[in-house]
Image (spheres, helix red, strand yellow):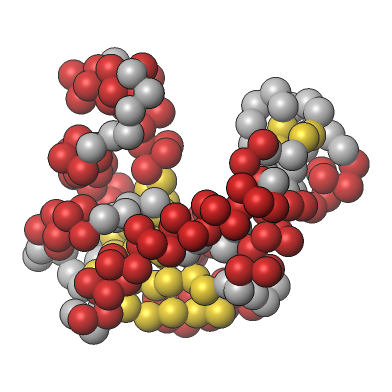
Amino acid sequence: MALNLVLLGPPGAGKGTQAERLAARLNVPRISTGDLLREAVAQGTPLGGLVRAVMARGELVSDDLMIEVVRDRLGRPDAAAGFVLDGFPRTVAQAEALAGLVAGRGPLTVVEIRVPEQELVRRLGARMVCRGCGVTATPESAASGRCGRCGGELVQRADDDAGVVRERLQVFTRDTQPLVEYYRSRSMHQAVDGSGTPDQVFADLAAVAGAGR
């Protein structure tokens, strides 16, 4: 049976890192909406052209367009055995569409990574990214001050300022709470404590996802 997993969590919760680890453990693709949008634009497909036009206008990608991007990705052969979704759904409309996309593909497991706000502010304030390639620095490369991928200079993201972070977290909570309630009302929602070490969080996520240890 396919292992279909959605990860929810605020900025700084470690969703991206954990999604990659879970996908590797489950031997299914990690599907990131940010990566999907960039890929769609780069491929120059008709769908990618629509995405490019929206992004060029500085607008947010609509639910309908985002759903089509995800529909296209889930239709590829490597997703037949399941997937780990990171960044989708973000709205109840997207969640309802996802339910239709996975119908007949096995159950959908939704896991929320919960981290106290104070810890999120601390993490994001310490987060460094490469000025050159934009990748988030690992603890090892952050200590050296240079990007582990390209050797570029590491800097703090402008939106990781403490005041900006708190505002982003408030917006996330406001926008995501209806989504959490949607899944909770359908007994599809589980939560893990994301304040531990990455290995501890991964062990808890793997157990919830049925991926073993």
On the picture, is 203 further left or further right than 138?
A: left
What is the x, y in percent for residue 72?
20, 38
Image coordinates of residue 67 in percent, x first then y, are 20, 44
Q: Residue at x 10, y 58 (%)?
A: 100
Going 87% across and 38% down the picture, which residue do you hit? 145
User: In this rendering, is residue 124 above or below 59?
Assistant: below
Question: Which quadrant holds the N terminus?
Answer: bottom left
Left or right of 209 in this view: 146: right
- State the image quarter where residue 121 is shown: bottom right
Q: Nearer the viewer, residue 126 or 49?
A: 126
* 161 to 99, vertically: above or below: above
- Residue 28 showing in the rendered view: no
Q: Residue at x 32, y 78 (%)?
A: 189
Residue 128, can we see it? Answer: yes
Where is residue 9? Give x, y as percent.
Answer: 47, 64
Among the 4 quarters of the image, the one containing residue 8: bottom left
- State the image coordinates of residue 164 (x, y, percent, origin top left): 61, 47
**Residue at screen point 67% across, 76% down:** 196
Q: Looking at the figure, which quarter contains the C terminus?
A: bottom right
